[in-house]
Amino acid sequence: MAAKAFSRSITPSLVLLFIFLSFAQGKEIMVGGKTGAWKIPSSDSDSLNKWAEKARFQIGDSLVWKYDGGKDSVLQVSKEDYTSCNTSNTIAEYKDGNTKVKLEKSGPYFFVSGAKGHCEQGQKMIVVVMSQKHRYIGISPAPSPVDFEGPAVAPTSGVAGLKVGLLVTVGVLVLGLF
């Protein structure tokens, strides 16, 4: 009987912990939303910058590129090198065809193709990582309208994290009932 009472008292805490952990993990985001998107765009509307402008990137997320590593590469560069398509002064260089870059700080990240002439033809991308808002738990005044800069955009991925959190929550509740 004591074990069942303990189980019921700990269950809500575990549920909240699992829900928090499922949302706290960074997402893996496929660049362009699909394999092979790292290429010279056929038009301005096909540009990866159009895709990146619609997405919300958070600290801890990872960008994933899938491309032919024998023909192309991904270069992380400064804003100036991005603008001028200078590929000789890189921050980081990736050539494996299956590149994963973790976004560890807020602000802009600049990427260009390492294939000769591709950057000049538009194969480049700027990703802006949102800053974390620090809020304290407890009683606080309602946020002012200034905190909201516009309508929310649905995340490009992350449903898997929500599904895992929901499955874990259901599992914990079922175990807590028996």
Image (spheres, rainbow, N blue to C red):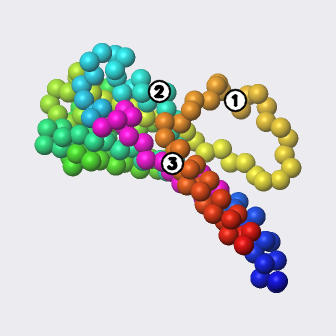
Q: Earlier in the sequence, mark 3 or mark 1?
A: 1
Query: Compared with residue 165, is residue 176 higher up or lower down, i.e. above or below?
Result: below
Q: CA distance from mark 2 to mark 3?
A: 22 Å
Mark 2 Cα-neighbour bin, 10 Å: few <14, some 14–19, many ≥20: few
Picture residue at 80% right of the left edge, 72% below the top: 9
Q: CA distance from mark 2 to mark 1?
A: 17 Å
Query: Compared with residue 56, is residue 69 higher up or lower down, i.e. above or below?
Result: below
Task: Provide the residue designation for mark 3.
Answer: 160
Q: Position of residue 127 (x, y in %)?
A: 43, 34
Q: Secondary structure at mark 2?
A: helix
Q: Is residue 44 visible?
A: yes
**Quarter holding the C terminus?**
bottom right
Please report the bounds of the magenta region as a residue range.
Answer: 19-35
> Splitting the image into 4 quarters, where does residue 44 fall?
top left
Q: Position of residue 171 (x, y in %)?
A: 63, 63
Q: CA distance from mark 3 to mark 1?
A: 27 Å
Q: Which mark is residue 53?
A: 2
Mark 2 or 3, which is nearer the eye? Answer: 3
Picture residue at 56% right of the left edge, 50% below the top: 163
- Does residue 97 appear to the left or right of 160 in the view shown? left
Q: Earlier in the sequence, mark 2 or mark 1?
A: 2
